Amino acid sequence: MIYFNSNTRLNFVDINLPNDQAQLQAYYKIRRSIFCEEQELFQESDFDDHDHAAIPIIAINHYLGSPDEVVGVVRIYEENKREWFGGRLGVVNGYRSFSNFICPHLFKGLEPTALYHKSIAAGLIYRAVSLANYLGCDKFSAHVQEQNVKLFERLHWKVIEGISLYGVQHYLMEADLEAYPATAIYTADPLKSEQALAQLPYVA
Ligand SMILES: CC(C)(COP(=O)(O)OP(=O)(O)OC[C@H]1O[C@@H](n2cnc3c(N)ncnc32)[C@H](O)[C@@H]1OP(=O)(O)O)[C@@H](O)C(=O)NCCC(=O)NCCS
């Protein structure tokens, strides 16, 4: 189902923290289906120690203003003080290469560039790094699979070094934080977003 480019402003993608257990379960389910079943990087589960403290971020397709389904995921965690890592970036197959969608609260009044509306992955990466920046970040890195290096380079990341992980070629990459101004997670009630962050860790 594809709902975007409508004039109603009721059909959009929101990129945010999971709002309830069902969305959190969907986040883990998508991770499992992409990283265990599709890519076979892990066998039973891709859950690891970072998940005890990581912040999960999801892209949710909205239909007529209501959340419909989770279509993308990413997680961030603070590896060392003010040094963050992102990972487990994934977009559900039918939503890959999806562009020019509406994402109402992604920039919170800032509109750095339309680059981040070019795909669900780009939106997730924007949200991940700008949230870490909001929480206090001097360095944001990720281990990026070879075929995705170009995507990250387009989004103001640079390669630091190559590294083999889970038997697959990856590249350690670093974001240019200037391209990701600090942006809190949006909810209609600012207190709620603080509460959401305070409820960490998010383990299903
Ligand atoms: C990588 C991924 C998150 C990109 O999501 P997206 O929203 O489609 O992002 P984009 O539309 O910007 O596409 C990024 C790249 O993936 C390619 N791509 C898009 N859909 C694809 C598909 N179904 N199959 C293979 N490649 C695809 C695009 O051509 C683009 O390549 P380019 O950078 O050389 O132009 C998504 O393809 C995915 O979930 N892949 C499996 C998991 C994965 O690789 N995670 C990232 C680990 S670093």
Image (tube, rainbow, N blue to C red):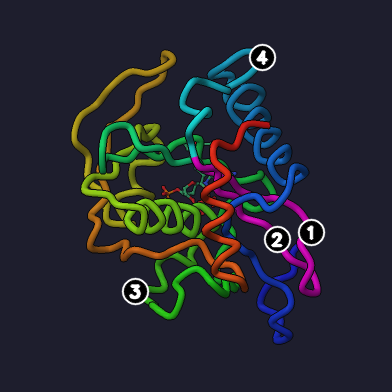
Which of the two labelled residues, at mark 3 and mark 1, occupies the earlier sequence position? 1
Q: Nearer the viewer, residue 141 or 145?
A: 141
**Distance CA(mark 4)–CA(mark 3):** 40 Å
Which of the two labelled residues, at mark 2 and mark 4, occupies the earlier sequence position? 4
Residue at image coords 57%, 55%: 195
> Would you name the residue on which mark 3 appears?
112
Amino acid type at circle 3 is Pro
Question: In the shown orientation, is residue 185 left or right of residue 10?
Answer: left
> Would you name the residue on which mark 1 appears?
68
Residue at image coords 59%, 67%: 187
Residue at image coords 56%, 65%: 191
Q: Position of residue 156 (x, y in %)?
A: 27, 56
**Distance CA(mark 1)–CA(mark 4):** 27 Å
Which of the two labelled residues, at mark 1 and mark 2, occupies the earlier sequence position? 2
Helix, strand or loop under label 3: loop
Residue at the extreme left = 160
**Distance CA(mark 2)–CA(mark 4):** 27 Å
Instruction: Give the crowd class for mark 1: few <14, some 14-19, many >=20 residues within 10 Å.
Output: some
Instruction: Give the crowd class for mark 3: few <14, some 14-19, many >=20 residues within 10 Å.
Output: few
Amino acid type at circle 2 is Asn
* Residue 44: mark: 4
Q: Is mark 4 within 8 Å of ligand 1?
A: no
Amino acid type at circle 4 is Glu
Amino acid type at circle 1 is Asp
> Would you name the residue on which mark 2 appears?
61
Q: Position of residue 199 (x, y in %)?
A: 58, 44
Which of the two labelled residues, at mark 4 and mark 3, occupies the earlier sequence position? 4
- What main secondary structure does the magenta stretch of the protein show? strand
